[in-house]
Amino acid sequence: MKVMKYWLYLVAKLAIAAGIVYGLQAALAWKYPKPHIDPRQLGDFGPPPPLFLHDMLYTFLTLGIWLIGAGLLSLILRDQRRRCRTCLRRLIMPVNSGSWGHLVTFGPPRTELICPFGHGTLSIEELQITGRQPPDWQPHDEDIWKELESYYQAPK
Ligand SMILES: [Zn+2]
């Protein structure tokens, strides 16, 4: 159920981004001055061709909107993979482990982030030799902060 929320959040953000791109495209189509075509030139060829790929500036602006869409998508995905799978909070305290110089001894460099509420640890491989490795989410069975609290509150 909790994991469901994580994906619903992603879908919601994607829907918002799609809405923004669609809105920009609609605004462009609405605001862009219609070309003045001499009806005599039109002849029997029917309605004027679509602006996209026929009008330089319009095509350029459309590509720009697609670029914004691609940028939004990459921001969304980057944000999404750095969030807790349980509570959706942004993960904190990036810790680098491993080393570029000692790949064999200490393992490849990786960044570990934790949820501020201790739901789990995300481990991102910095070195991606074998293609794309999905970030490694490790849920914590126990609440580490509760554990710490009980440690400090234990009678001495
Ligand atoms: Zn969490």
Image (cartoon, rainbow, N blue to C red):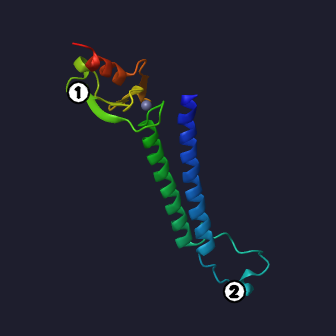
Q: Point out which mark residue 99 bears.
A: 1
The residue under the point 55% across, 58% down is: 20
**In screen coordinates, is 138 left or right of 156?**
right
Which residue appears farthest toward the right when viewing the image?
A: 44
Which residue is more in the foreground, 64 or 6? Answer: 6
**In screen coordinates, is 16 left or right of 90?**
right
Q: Is residue 29 above or below residue 106?
A: below
**In screen coordinates, is 121 left or right of 16?**
left
The residue under the point 44% across, 47% down is: 75
Which residue is more in the foreground, 75 or 131? Answer: 75
**In screen coordinates, is 78 left or right of 154?**
right
Q: Is residue 122 above or below residue 156?
A: below
Residue 132 in sight in this render: no
Q: In terms of secondary structure, where does tag 2 sit? A: loop
Which quadrant of the view contains residue 140?
top left
Q: Position of residue 70 (x, y in %)?
A: 49, 52
Q: Which quadrant is home to the C terminus?
A: top left
Residue 31 in sight in this render: yes
- Between disc 2 and disc 1, whose residue precedes? 2
Which quadrant of the view contains residue 145?
top left
The residue under the point 62% across, 65% down is: 26
Q: Mark 2 sits on what residue?
A: 38
Quarter, ligand 1: top left
Q: Position of residue 64 (x, y in %)?
A: 49, 62
Amino acid type assigned to the residue bearing label 2 in the image: Asp
Label 2: few (<14), some (14–19) or many (≥20) C-alpha neighbours in 10 Å? few
Which quadrant of the view contains residue 148?
top left
Q: In terms of secondary structure, where does tag 1 sit? A: loop
Label 1: few (<14), some (14–19) or many (≥20) C-alpha neighbours in 10 Å? some
Q: Which quadrant is home to the N terminus?
A: top right
Q: Position of residue 128 (x, y in %)?
A: 36, 31
